Amino acid sequence: MFSKFTKLARFSSKFDNQGVKPWRGLKEVASSKGLGLVLAGLGAGGLGYLMWNSERRAAQISKSMIAGGHLVSKDISLQRTKSALAYFAGGVAMTSAMVFGMLRSPTILKYSFGWAPLLIGLPTTFVCMYKLRSTPQTPDNSLSRHLYWALFNSCIAFSIVPLISMSQALVIRDAFLVTSGAFGGLTLVALNARDDAFLGMSGFLGAGLGCIAAVGIANIFLQSNALMNVWLYGGLALFLAYVLYDMKEIQNRAKRSIYFDPMSESVKVYLDFVNVFIRILMIMNNRNNRK
């Protein structure tokens, strides 16, 4: 027994003399990955708390609006809700057309696989969302607002082009149909529920969104299968719940807000749809690759 340990020590010292560290490297990798997971957990917790607090305040505003009673007629609120859904449908159609247009351009397809979507597309998306909310809805600003809206949709299309290019046409079709069916069913549930329904989920949804965002960013560097499953399946459940919450919030604002911006309101459910579609498509791709 002792001789075996002696041989093992000589074997290890031989590699050490040659500058090779057979075990130390593995320990360093495991240690750095563990530290990365801890930091990712702390980041997810902090971002989750910030989002929880933000969504909780938004829910309080919605509850105060409900307590204040109706401010507009039923016809006006119905027209507002239809306008928001029309912008949502237009955004999905525009994004789909842009995606298939980008797939025909080798240059755009090449850059979409690099850091451009993260370093250029993501900041531009946030800028466009800010401009949509900060620019008043007036006839003079109509053109600029629609340009921001189109640029926002083009950035989303640019970010999902790599996933679409690696998927089969039938899988893309099935994922889109499943997403549309789930979105349509949840929308009907939300619009026919009582006014204060789903508002209690706001804090949990905000915390979940912060955690999913932190996990997604951390996994770019850690490449962990466990974190990937959290982002994939946890995000799918989260954004399906967000469809209920966001649709009910749009309906409440359409009923009670003095100022209602259908374009800005549609962005929330549009992002819900895109996030659900991406995850369903990835799940279907994984199952298709196992066959």
Image (spheres, rainbow, N blue to C red):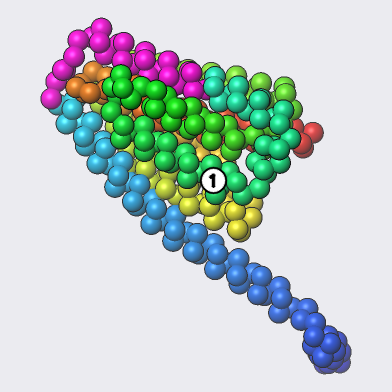
Q: Is residue 33 visible?
A: yes
User: Where 232 falls versus 224 (above or below)?
Assistant: above
Give the x, y percent position of residue 52.
Answer: 33, 46
Kindly identify the amino acid type of the residue bearing the numbered disc 1.
Ile
Residue located at (71% from left, 76% from top): 25
Observer-nearest of 197 and 123: 123
Q: Hey, which quadrant is residue 4 in on the image?
A: bottom right
Give the x, y percent position of residue 37.
Answer: 54, 62
Residue extent of the magenta highlight: 68-92
Observer-nearest of 111 and 247: 111
Query: Pointer 1: what residue?
Result: 120
Question: Overall secondary structure of the magenta stretch?
Answer: helix
Give the x, y percent position of residue 271.
Answer: 47, 32
Residue located at (30% from left, 44% from top): 54
Secondary structure under tag 1 reads helix
Residue located at (23% from left, 18% from top): 255
User: Is 259 placed left or right of 214 in the picture?
Assistant: left
Residue located at (25% from left, 7% from top): 75
**Does 98 appear in magenta?**
no
User: Where 275 falls versus 262 (above or below)?
Assistant: below
Q: Residue furthest front?
A: 140
Observer-nearest of 261 and 178: 261
User: Is 275 placed left or right of 97 in the picture?
Assistant: left
